[in-house]
Amino acid sequence: MKRLLITGAAGGLGKVMRERLRPLAEIIRVSDIAPLGDAGEHEECVQCDLADGDAVHQMVEGCDGILHLGGISVERPFEQILGGNIIGMYNLYEAARAHGHPRIIFASSNHTIGFYPKTQRLTPDMPTRPDGLYGVSKCFGEALARMYFEKFGQETASVRIGSCMAAPSNYRMLSTWLSYDDFALLIERIFAAPFIDCPIIWGVSANDASTWDNSHISWLGWQPRDNAETYRREIEEKGVPDGGDALVRYQGGVFVNDPIYK
């Protein structure tokens, strides 16, 4: 690619991908509403509020691909989620439509299906069961991506990220963990594919305890290499939650207990 846009680049995952994805494009354009620091070599920094349609159009112009990590990433009052995750998503897709349909990787979430039992194996065609307003906003994002593909041919991979971090830190993450390496490899494969349509992909490593079925994207050639099982002893030494704990009962973990923030 000539220019790859990474939104949400000031966040924890954005900072990691900002470094790891440098080989994918001649220029990495990083964006966030928060300060981004100085531009690195072959970088462009654009501070942008996703709720500002004009600013988003300028941010997207000239980009060949978009990794959309921006927006609110946890449960928050509806007004915040509305601006970052709903209006912001619409602005991004309108900008992409105006600027040549750069392929998009949308950071969706496992919280689109949070109220499914932890023991149930899930495929991406099953009905959503969001566990909060944040999860609802990600359901909206997936639906918007599908509509823009059907109506305008905008290609998007909606990746329902589990728990993307350096290592799993609690019992639930033995099934939901996505390593940085596996996520970076998935991004590489999505941008390298000749055509992707509009798939929903489970963002999860090759965990023995995973309950998410990615067999529908075998054509992508993505083979996650890491396995949370490596950390099981370390995690279980901290204590195993009982069967009534949300970490054990629900796919969304403690998000099912979060209040609706006012």
Image (cartoon, rainbow, N blue to C red):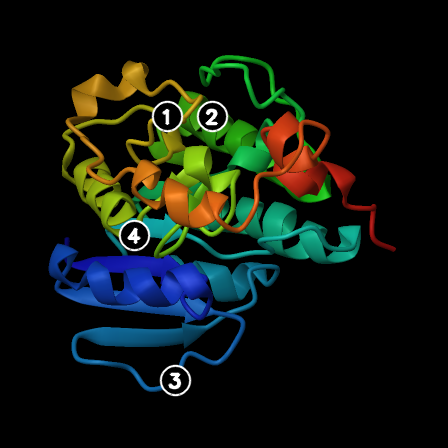
- The amino acid type of the residue labelled 3 equals Gly
Q: Is residue 92 left or right of residue 61?
A: right
Residue 62 visible in this rendered orientation of the protein: no
Return the residue at label 1.
198
> Disc 4 marks which amino acid?
Tyr
Q: Which circle's residue, 2 or 4, is located before the other in the chain?
A: 2
Q: Residues within 10 Å of mark 4 (few under 14, many from 20)?
A: many
| Label 1 with label 2: CB-CB less than 8 Å | yes
**Other residues around mark 2 within 10 Å, as few (<14) / some (14–19) / many (≥20):** many
Sooner in the amino-acid sequence: mark 3 or mark 1: 3
Q: Looking at the picture, does residue 157 appear above or below residue 37?
A: above
Structural distance between the alpha carbons of marks 3 and 4: 22 Å
Residue holding disc 2: 146
CB-based contact (under 8 Å), mark 4 and mark 1: no
Cβ–Cβ under 8 Å for marks 2 and 3: no
> What whole-number distance in Å separates the C-alpha atoms at marks 4 and 1?
23 Å
Instruction: Write down the residue under mark 4.
Output: 180
Q: In percent of the image, x 67 and y 27: which residue is there?
A: 243
Kind of residue indicated by mark 1 = Cys
Marks 3 and 1 in Cβ contact (< 8 Å): no
Q: Which disc is residue 23 wearing?
A: none
Q: Residue furthest right?
A: 262
